[in-house]
Image (spheres, rainbow, N blue to C red):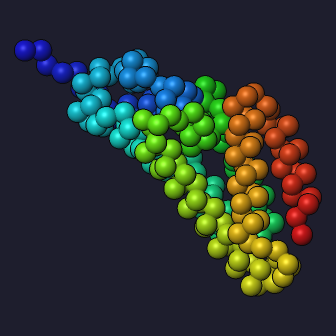
Amino acid sequence: MGRQREFSPEEALDAALTEFWSKGYEGTSYADLSAATGVARPGLYSVFGNKEELFFKALDRYETLYMGFMTHALTLPKAKAVIEAILVGSINLQTTQETAKGCLGINGAIACTEPSEPVRQELIRRRILSEKALAVRLQQAKDDGDLPSNVMPKDLARFVMTVTQGMAVQAKAGVSKAELRRVADMMLAQLP
């Protein structure tokens, strides 16, 4: 019996992450994952489980490697700085990768059919957690007098997240970093 080839699970996970980011969850086949990672399907199964489990692990890795700007933004002292850091961080993330444009979560959720409903639901759950964290931070800003009393933090958080998600779709379609920055600047100019 032949010996299985050794591979680095971290490197394989990073390659799978790029593949999912580039093609979305449903657009990525196990053949794509094997080609990208250099690991045969049985080896991927043995380390990561099925495609859904591999996607969730890739999503966790994406958050660890790329979403730190969000955590940092929430620590900034002024609401406008928080929002600007989220917009700029999103633009940088969505346009920096050579082969993977946009956002892994948006790319993964846009084209999910019924068999992939658990993936779509997990992406929705994570999006809601980010939006809630921003709403809590904006409520703090309102309580501190940094936002006017007529601003609804939950609505503003949803607005910011909707803009970042729209920019992700635009980035995936090839819109440049400079063009997305102009969108962000327009939004920032409208903030109270």
Would residue 172 be found to the left or right of residue 67 on screen?
right
Q: Position of residue 40 (x, y in %)?
A: 29, 20
- Against 102, residue 130 (above or below) is below
| Quarter of the image where the C terminus is located | bottom right
Q: Say whether residue 61 is visible.
A: no
- Against 27, residue 71 (above or below) is below
- Against 158, residue 37 (above or below) is above
The residue lying toward the viewer, choosing from 170 and 2, is 170
Residue at 75%, 57% (x, y): give it. Answer: 160
Q: Position of residue 86 (x, y in %)?
A: 71, 56
Residue at 86%, 45% (x, y): give it. Answer: 183
Outermost residue toward the top? 2
Q: Position of residue 167 (x, y in %)?
A: 75, 42
Give the quadrant of residue 68: bottom right
Outermost residue toward the left? 1
Q: Position of residue 76 (x, y in %)?
A: 70, 69
| Quarter of the image where the N terminus is located | top left
Would residue 102 be found to the left or right of residue 9 on screen?
right
The residue lying toward the viewer, choosing from 24 and 90, is 24
